[in-house]
Amino acid sequence: MNEIQNLAAEIKKFADARDWELFHTPKNLSMAVAGEAGELVAEFQWLTAEQSMRSNMSKEKLMDVELEIADVAIYLIRLADVLGVDISEVVRKKLAINESRF
């Protein structure tokens, strides 16, 4: 089992313990990914390109960004798990497509 599969199992266990299965439909999870991505974008909204670099962020700002990245990843991993999509496999497939396009 790879790290993404381990995370998917942990996330599923967390959701199952709260009886969230009913709410974890592909539609709802994709909307949650979009919402959390918006919150990640908001962390950078008024920063300059230079201010957005890790080395220029305060510890507090970096923590906020890390937590939003985690939220996006959690919902994305959960969505892939619900749909039976192997993230590693589809990322490699998409990289191969991009390699031929760019």
Image: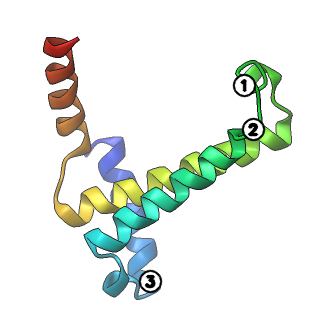
| Amino acid type at image mark 2 | Leu
Please name the residue shown 27% across and 69% down the image: 26
Q: Which residue is mark 2?
A: 62
- The numbered dot on residue 54 is 1
Residue 60, above or below 31: above
Please name the residue shown 26% across and 56% down the image: 80
Residue 47, above or below 98: below
Q: Earlier in the sequence, mark 1 or mark 3?
A: 3
User: In terms of image quadrants, where is residue 97?
Assistant: top left
Q: Which residue is mark 3?
A: 17
Residue at mark 3 to residue at mark 2: CA–CA distance: 30 Å
Q: Are marks 1 and 2 in contact (CB under 8 Å)?
A: yes
Q: Secondary structure at mark 3?
A: helix
Query: Residue 79: x and y, percent?
Result: 31, 61
| Amino acid type at image mark 3 | Ala
The answer to which of 7 and 28 lies nearer the viewer is: 28
Q: 10 Å neighbourhood of mark 2: few (<14), some, or many (≥20)?
A: some
Query: Residue 14: x and y, percent?
Result: 46, 73
Residue at mark 1 to residue at mark 3: CA–CA distance: 35 Å
Query: Residue 36: x and y, percent?
Result: 54, 57
Q: Earlier in the sequence, mark 3 or mark 2?
A: 3
Please name the residue shown 80% across and 41% down the image: 61
Q: Earlier in the sequence, mark 1 or mark 2?
A: 1
Query: Residue 31: x and y, percent?
Result: 40, 66
| Amino acid type at image mark 1 | Arg
